Image (cartoon, rainbow, N blue to C red):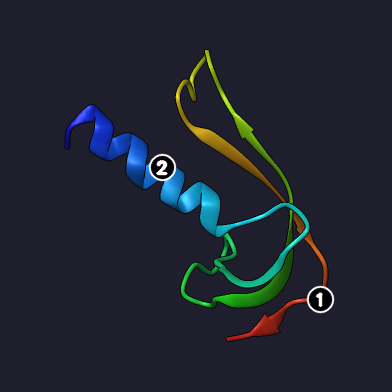
Amino acid sequence: MTKNAAQRSRWTFYEAIKVGESHRMSYAPLNAPRLLKDILTEIRHITFCREGSYKDHYLVGLSIVENEKSV
């Protein structure tokens, strides 16, 4: 993938989600990875990292909004 293509795909994802939105997401517990849990999750922040281990990546902060439900 060229650098420009990578930048376009990154921006496409970034533009698809917004801080404050809530989405149902599936989580896999560490002790039982096959037992997915469907949890309402809010996007708290989207931060672009300019240095460090996650350089040139976005970090997305998530917050659990609702108790888990088995999928």
- Name the image quarter holding the N terminus: top left
Count residues near mark 1 (Cα–Cα under 10 Å), then give few for <14, some for 14-19, many for 20+: few
Amino acid of disc 2 = Arg
The residue at 54%/36% (across/down) is: 58
Between residues 17 and 43, which one lies in front from this camera angle? 17
- On the picture, is 29 further left or further right than 20? left
Which residue sits furthest left? 1
- Name the image quarter holding the C terminus: bottom right
The residue at 55%/76% (across/down) is: 36
Q: Residue 53 appears at what percent x and percent y?
A: 49, 19
Q: Secondary structure at mark 2?
A: helix
Between residues 47 and 54, which one lies in front from this camera angle? 47
Q: Quadrant of residue 27?
A: bottom right
* Mark nearer the viewer, 2 or 1: 2
Between residues 21 and 27, which one lies in front from this camera angle? 21
Q: Residue 41 appears at what percent x and percent y?
A: 72, 65
Which residue sits furthest top? 51
Q: Which mark is residue 34?
A: none
Q: Which mark is residue 67?
A: 1
63 vs 38: above or below = above
- On the picture, is 21 further left or further right than 65? left
Amino acid of disc 1 = Asn
The residue under label 2 is: 10
The residue at 53%/77% (across/down) is: 35
Q: CA distance from mark 2 to mark 1?
A: 30 Å
The residue at 74%/77% (across/down) is: 68
60 vs 16: above or below = above
